[in-house]
Amino acid sequence: MGLSRSLTCVLLVTVAGLLCFGLVMVYSTTFAQDGTKYFYRQMQWMGIGVAGMVAVTLMPREWLSRWSRVILLLIVAALAYLFLAHVAVKLFSKPALRFFPLVPGRIKGGFRWLRLGQISIQPSEFAKFGLILYLATYYGTRSRETIETWKGGVLIPGLASAMVLGFIFLGKDLSSTVITASVVLVMMFLAGVRMRFLLSLVLLGAVAGTAAIALNPERVTRVVSYRHPELRKQGDGYQLWHSHLAMGSGGFRGRGVTRSIMKRVYLPEAHTDFILAVLGEEMGYLGVLAVLGLYVLFLVSTVGIAHLCRDPVDMLICMGVGFLVAFQALVNISVVSGWCPTTGLTAPFLSYGGSSIISILLCVGLVFNACRRNLAAIHQEMLDTKVIPTYKVFHLARPE
Amino acid sequence: MSSASEQPKQQPLWLRLRAAARRVQAPVAALPAPVVRIGRLLGQRLLRFWRQFAPDGKQLPQNRGESTNFAPLARYACLAVVLVLLFGGVARHIYNLQVTRHQELYLEAQKLYTRMAVKQAQRGKIYDLAGNLLAGNIAIQNIYAEPKRFNKKHYHAITKLLADTLQLDYNELDRRFQAIQRHEHIKICIKDFVDTQAAHHIVNAALPGVTVECSQKASGLFRVIFRPTQAGRQRQDVVNILARILDLSAEDIDNQILRAFNRPSEIVVKRHVDYSVAHKIKKVAEKNQYSGIRIEEEYLRNYPHDRQLANLIGFLDNNGKGVSGIEALFDAHMQPTPGKIQFERDGSNRMIPQSVITMSEPENGTDVYLTIALPIQQIVDEELTRLVALHEPKRAYVIMMNPKTGAIMALGHYPSFNPNDRSTMTDGAIIQPHAFMMGFEPGSIMKGISIAAVMEQRPIGLEDTFYCERGTWYYGGRPLHDSSGSRFENMTVLEIVKKSSNIGTAKIALEIEEKDLYQHLLDFGFGRRTGVGFIPANGDPVFFRNEAHGRLPGLEQWSKVSITRIPIGQGILCTPLQMVQAYGALANHGIMMQPYIIAKTVTGGVSRFSSPLVKGQPIQPETARKMTQALKEVTTKGGTGTRAAVPGFEVAGKTGTAQKWISDPSLKAKGYYSHREYVASFIGYVPADNPEFVLLVAVDSPSTGAHYGGTVAGPTFSRVSVRTLCFLQIPPTTDALTPPAMTASTGTAATNP
């Protein structure tokens, strides 16, 4: 019980710490250009996200599991609707958008956002939440025999995931597709799907990914040239080179919070995808290490929580969320530091963006849900087995 | 379908929904049977498909020991270890990036955003004695635009903003911007030093947009100019043909064109815009994030008093270098030292205010304070203008000097110019301070000096008489005339001065030897520059390099008659200032002061003052007193300069009416003395016994009215003196000022002033 509670605390502190870093950095990166607008928006998003997280924590898990299919279907529907709008615009012209309410049109080169009044929603971000919940529920409630079959272990969950992944990919969001796909594969791997099925899926994914990259010359140059952005300062390497300059000029201790220069129009996406570069410039290597440490702590605490879980669904949820956050953070920071090819991916908890932060907080809510219920379960277990607490043993022993 | 499947376990709802579905079966039944069958089949298949995704609801054992799915934890732990290792790898990579390469990348980043800028300083200003500004700097704003950098969607807004605020024509501005955007201004020298044959070839080909010009660097060769936009669609063909003819690679030419297109091209929208207007543009542009507008501050030299003292002060050329006058004299000192600042800029090229570091402060140039007193100068200028209107001379000068110090108090020039208006500067001669550079034959005003020189050498009393030959005297075979109609006989020295007798003066001069006269004239400063300028207490003096020497012929050049001509101001050239300097000695008890025009200079708060300097003592105080006595007679009744009299003060002065020497190369003789052109002048000092100033009024070739010094220059002398004495608050020394009306009414007051 002590371990479980402290793990929950660690998780809570980790998330709070990352959110604080994020808030400070969003303020720092946007204040010079746009004042406090982005800062307050991010506060709003975080408020909504935290409320959603608490709600998910308090919901009965069974209820969430029962509805997971529908949640996924809604997400697929939203993604399909966006894709349809995209196709319509491509086939006809921009005025065709009139027949697609809630679609604001092309933003940052793709149809990824739905507009509900003042709020923009990116369904592909919520797909991660939906998939983790659905797959955990699916695998967690099936017997080992079912999972090890082709149909029950791969085909049915694979089809469900493929629908989501396909529409995310068609929405021109390769990096999101890759992250979500790897989460799906990892969930399958953890659930105990047979390795030969899994390997064939990985192979398929690799071929599809390579094709997606090879067919787009822009992506090819990105993959080829990410190692030496200084050779293409004004071209493809522009963003990465400026990211290097930002991190490099930060040094070990950084220039000081809000002192970054590269955030001032030089570095594109400084408040979203490349927020860690600015963090590196302002807080130096120490700041980056702190953030990396927090991510690792998040991962480790999910391992611990999964270890304590009684219900395989909870266990899979913890693992899925832990992997999602850690992997996305890893990819983001590798992109920012030029360790892997550039793709557009937000840093979990840090980057500005409503959908991303709400979705990730909902995922954390699932983990807290597992904590909450398993805490109770462990407590019950202790009462049932009549384990004498150590202090009582000590107390009994003292008179002798 | 989907609404039914949402609640698969709630039987009542499910049944209710099925009942509802049956109610709509009637229209479905109308469909052909196979369609209904296929539809139902599809529906059942879909339902089964959907159910496959459902959690099967079977509760697994809660105890972990019995769990069938224990494997994930081990797998997950392995995965977590891999991820942590990857985190370690990325941390190492970032260490390499941030710590190892810090210096290199930091320098690169600084290169990207650190910029140096020049902070303009002001050229030194020119003030009068009391600190009134004579030459200052106006901060003006120049507005530049780079249409290629305009935000596309704001193009019209930007153009409209510029057109409206700067009061320019919108269409014209639009045309200029569009021309730049379309690269119409771009012309490229494809090749220089093209031989005649190739040039012919190109001309014959009549390529659009291609012109052949003579090479500017080598004669007989040509250069090929290409305006790519004029070629339009045929551009590539033209480039290919040119490449073939000129033996170049088409790719090189293409690159050359591309480079030219990408070069920033900024145009001046408007120069010399007021600060408020420029500020407004800046505000609007910043608010709407317009790019491509640049506002630069510049200092423009301005002379608030326009023509006043223009000759003395001078002006600047287009590069800000002094051309004439004080501006040229002190140019090196007045040049400002621009400051250097280092700042950081953001990605859209805006300065980050907190980042500005001053490398060196801008230093304004040396300020110069003249000895001129502006109120007196105003008096002088007004009177000079009146004189010019009356007599329309070629040139006229009024110079006022304090004889006790040598400070020039006022300096009037005619003709003059307006240093703020380039169109008035056409004549090269008048843009200089020509009072220092113009030599003229002084005529009778020389007599005061020459008689003083003789009296210094020989004890001649003022009452000694000389026979004046009834108007014409032959000496050395040449006739010497007194002014027309004069039949003077025996005259005292006093009368000779008063009536300005040439023969009398010549006879007085003959009392001493040529060499003595020559030496005395040298002592009085003739034939040498006065060296007017800045004489600091310590340090090197600064004086006008182009001041004239005048011309005092050396003794070996003197003819037999020279000794009779030079004392009456013929055969000698002097500048107006030399004459004032010499009379300064008469006024100042024989002590001649160095004239100077700059009171002090101020460099960065440190002042250097001029100190009055004694230049010499050409005559003894006693001689000066005697000569002053004689000169006082000139403005008394019967004298030549009665109109120069100053009511209430005794004036020691001398009129001068010099015939101008006309050198005419068509004649055999070197030239002749004109009977139409004169230099009318009056010089004097007031009050005679304790003079406040020496004042010279010299008028070159008055064309209307009289030509005598007494009539032309005298009244101006009088008026300037009256007003100046009034300004200086000098109490009258004689009772002459008492009005006649008062004498009549209150007799006692009149007799005992």
Image (cartoon, coloured by chain):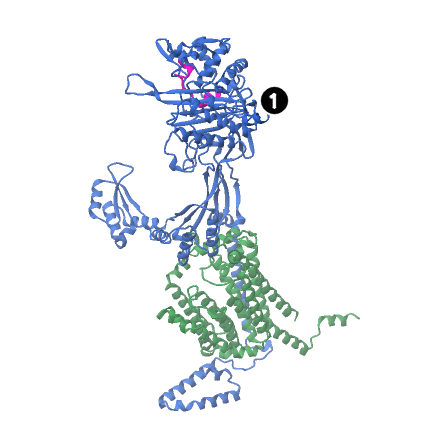
> B160 and A286: which one is in front?
B160
Residue bounds of the magenta highlight: B565-581
What's the colour of chain B in the image?
A: blue
Where's residue B318, x and y in %? 40, 37
Where's residue B355, x and y in %? 53, 48
Q: Which amino acid, mark 1?
A: Asn
What's the colour of chain A in the image?
A: green
> B342 and A154: which one is in front?
B342
Query: How many C-alpha atoms fall within 10 Å of the one at disc 1: few (<14), some, or many (≥20)?
Result: few
Say how many tags the image has: 1
Q: Is residue B34 above or below residue A364?
A: below
- Quarter of the image where the C terminus of chain B is located: top right
Where's residue B526, x and y in %? 44, 18
**What kind of element bears circle 1?**
loop
Residue A233 visible in the current orientation: no
Residue position for label 1: B752
Where's residue B154, x and y in %? 41, 57
Quarter-of-image position of residue B41: bottom left
> A31 and B443: which one is in front?
B443
Callout 1: chain: B
